[in-house]
Amino acid sequence: MRADQLALNAMLSGIMEAKIGRWSDREKRYLPLANGDRISAEDKVAILNSKRHAFNGMSQTELAASLDGLARVSARGGAGARKATEFYKAVSQAALNVVITPVDRGGLATFITCTDGARRCAWYHSVTSQGANVARRGALNQHLHVVRDLLRLANGNKDFGYLTDYASYGLNQLFIGPDGEQVSNIPTFATFLGPKGPQGRGAFLTYGFDAKPNGLTTYFLSQAQKNCHYAIHDLDLLAAILKQPTMARTIAAAKALSTGSAVFKADQALRAIDDTGNSGSSEFVCNPSFNYGKSATGRFFAKHF
C-alpha cells in the first residue's frame, strides 16, 4: 500500500500540527514518511515531537480510532475501495503498535511485573509538551485516555480484541503496580495523591509526574482551575474503564473500588468540596456551581464507597 503523505498530514491536522514518521529498526529512530512509502500492519507510525520522537499515546490511539473508522467507511465501497481500506487498516494498526511497544524500541510503553509477581503492568507514556522527555514525564489523564481508548477499539473491532489485555496492563499499573520510587520511574494512582481536601478529607489529585534523577515527583498545573477539572476528568475516565465488564472483575478494579483506596481518597476530597462549599485550595480550585456528588461519576463511586 502506498502512503500519500499529504493525505496523512491532512488527517493529522485535526489532532495537532505535527510530523509523522515510521520507525526504522536498522537506524533505531523515526524517519519521515514520503510519497511512495509502503506501510504494513507490522510497522510503527507515530506522530512526532520537535525532537522527532513519539510522544503522545493519547493522540496515537485517537489516530488509530479515526483510521479504523475510515477503513469501515471505505469498506462499503466494495472491491473498488479495497486498496484504500487496506491502507487505513494498516496505518491504524501501525499507530497502535507505537502505543504497545516499549520506549527503547520506538514505542510509548513501559512494561513491568506487578506486585503480585505474576501479572503484567504497563504505563502508557503521553505528554503534551513538544520538548518533554516522554520516558520521564506523563499525565494521569492521558494514561487513562489510552486505557479507555484501547478498550473502545477492542469492543468495536474484533481484530483489536487483543487490546483488552493491554488495557488491563494499564489498569494494573495504577492499582497493583510497584511504587515508582522502589522499582521504576512510573507511577501508580496513589502516586498522584497530593494535599488533603477540606476538613482533612481525602486528597486532591495532582496532574502529572516527573521522574527526576533524584526521585519521582508529581505536580499541579499553574492554573488552579485546571487541576480540579482534570481531577474530575481522571475519575470520569476511570469510571468509564471500571464499568467495562472485562475490567470490572479484575483484581485491579477491586483494589480501586475498596474503601480507603487512593480512588476513595480522591473521591472524598471532591465530596468535601461539595459539602463545605469550599472551592478547594490555592492550587486546586473547583467551580462552585459544579456538584461532583450529583454527577454520573460521583454517583458511580458512591455505590462502591
Image: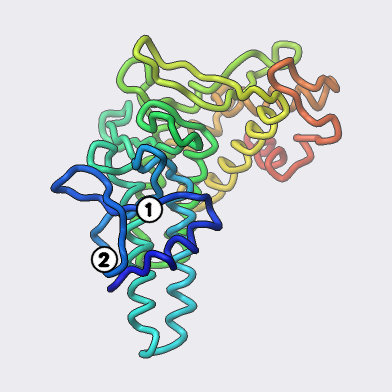
Percent coordinates x, y for residue 266 in the rendering: 63, 26
Which color scheme does this rendered protein use? rainbow
Q: What is the quadrant of residue 92 in the picture? A: bottom left
Please say if the residues under marks 2 and 1 sit with CB atoms less than 8 Å apart.
Answer: no
Q: State the residue position of label 2.
A: 37
Percent coordinates x, y for residue 235 in the rendering: 61, 37
Q: Is residue 279 above or below residue 143?
A: above
Which quadrant, please, contains the N terminus? bottom left
Q: Badge 2 local density, few (<14 within 10 Å), some, or many (20+)? A: few
Residue at x-position 40% and y-position 37%: 125
Q: Residue furthest bottom?
A: 79
In the rendered structure, the answer to whether residue 303 lies left or right of residue 106 reads right
Which quadrant, please, contains the C terminus? top right
Q: Which mark is residue 20?
A: 1
Percent coordinates x, y for residue 177 in the rendering: 37, 28
- Amino acid type of the residue tagged 1 in the rendering: Ile
Looking at the rendered structure, the number of numbered marks drawn on it comes to: 2
Where disc 2 sits, the SS reads loop
- Amino acid type of the residue tagged 2 in the rendering: Asp
Q: Nearer the viewer, residue 279 or 262?
A: 279
Residue at x-position 48% and y-position 57%: 12
